Image (cartoon, rainbow, N blue to C red):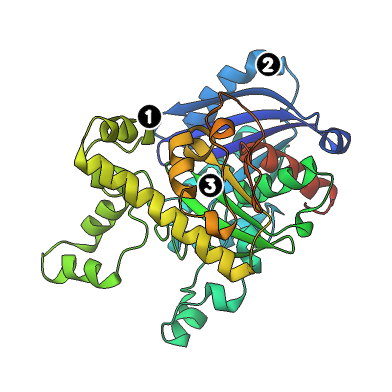
Amino acid sequence: MKILVLNAGSSSLKFHLFETDGDAIAAGSDRLLGRGMVDRVSSMKEALERAFAELRPVLGGAPVEAVGNRVVHGGDVFHSSVLVDEEVEKKIEELSALAPLHNPHNLEAIRAARQHLPHAKQVAVFDTAFHHTLPPRAYAYALPYEYMEEKKIRRYGFHGTSHRYVSWRFAQLHGKKRADYRMITCHLGNGCSICAIAGGKSVDTSMGFTPLEGLVMGTRSGDVDAGAILYLITREGKSPDEVLRILNGRSGLKGLSGVSNDMRDVIDAAESGDEHAKLALDVFCYRAAKYIGAYLAAMGGADVLIFAGGIGENSAEARARICAGLGELGIEIDPALNEAAANGDRQIGKSRVQTWVIPTNEELLIARDTWRCIHGVPHE
């Protein structure tokens, strides 16, 4: 089955074309036929037309039979990937209030794909779904209870497809199941989050009501005292929209360093003596180490720590700094293994808590979920 995977942004569309089925999933022989990104578009209809212009030579006239759509926010409604129908579309639209920067564009891509591929079945795969297993003690904020009950203000977590994929991949490499391990998975890229996985389920995660909470990110602040935000509004005269733009686009590595949101640039500047870049690097790594320590406590230990995402997969310096103070907690990386020029799944620490780098593949997971939804096969 040829499956088109779509990841829609405000003015861009990332696309991957896979060929897969039940046998291919079991054997790990799914085929990536084509991929790309179109940006600076005025509509998803235009984006899809440009995407298909790029894919036409690969397809050779063969039909796309299904579309897997990344949808950021599933709220407390969607606990797994689902076939898209009118009711699902309506719910995704309602949940746009929780993710106004993401869900409307995801929904626009679904509707554009239906126009372009009227006979293809569509599936929605939610970033939040993997975290629906969070216990109340992990997802509840200590606000008046009615805010959670009536306004749905609670921790949802994101990057679920990445955390789900790398935890599954680690277990597969060892011939076991995710439920056989206690895992801490670190998705570190321009967006960053950490997840605690016990019994095969997400039991805590660093992102919260929105993707702003938690770790320091490329341009996002991560944890900030709500009082500081109120101070900017009430004392400094900044509008809520302006503060939101600051928190999302002018903070994180970029805001602290004044150099870049790219970890490579920040490390280069820090090594050249830039004090702001040194601070940004220190805060980034310290915050990640704190969350890892917290999740070791929450689960009573862990069997493996996994790094994924652009920084997690490629920055030996960031991994080394994050793990430097965790030896007493059973995490020590091997400098030679950590710094080796290598790609793919690899172990970089053999202490009591194993440490691994596992490249994430969210698009493949979305393609597989799409096939499973269409054929009624349980998700892994």
List x then y, in percent, for residue 159: 55, 51
Left or right of 4 on screen, residue 9? left
Labels 1 and 2: the sequence-earlier one: 1
Residue drawn at point x = 49 percent, y = 53 percent: 193
Any mark on residue 58, and which? 2
Labels 2 and 3: the sequence-earlier one: 2
Any mark on residue 138, and which? none
Give me the C-alpha separation between circle 3 and circle 1: 27 Å
Left or right of 277 on screen, residue 309? right
Q: What residue is pinned by disc 1? A: 40
Above or below for 314 versus 226: above
Above or below for 81 versus 316: below
Label 3 packing within 10 angstroms: few (<14), some (14-19), many (20+): many
Task: Classify mark 2: helix, strand or loop.
Answer: helix
Q: What residue is pinned by disc 3? A: 187
Query: Disc 1 marks which amino acid?
Result: Arg
Left or right of 269 on screen, residue 187? right
Above or below for 315 versus 82: above
Residue drawn at point x = 21 percent, y = 43 percent: 276
Give me the C-alpha separation between circle 1 and circle 2: 24 Å
Give me the C-alpha separation between circle 2 and circle 3: 31 Å
Label 1 packing within 10 angstroms: few (<14), some (14-19), many (20+): few
List x then y, in percent, for residue 236: 10, 64
Is residue 243 something one can see in this rendering? yes
- Given residues 70 and 269, the one toward you in this image is 269
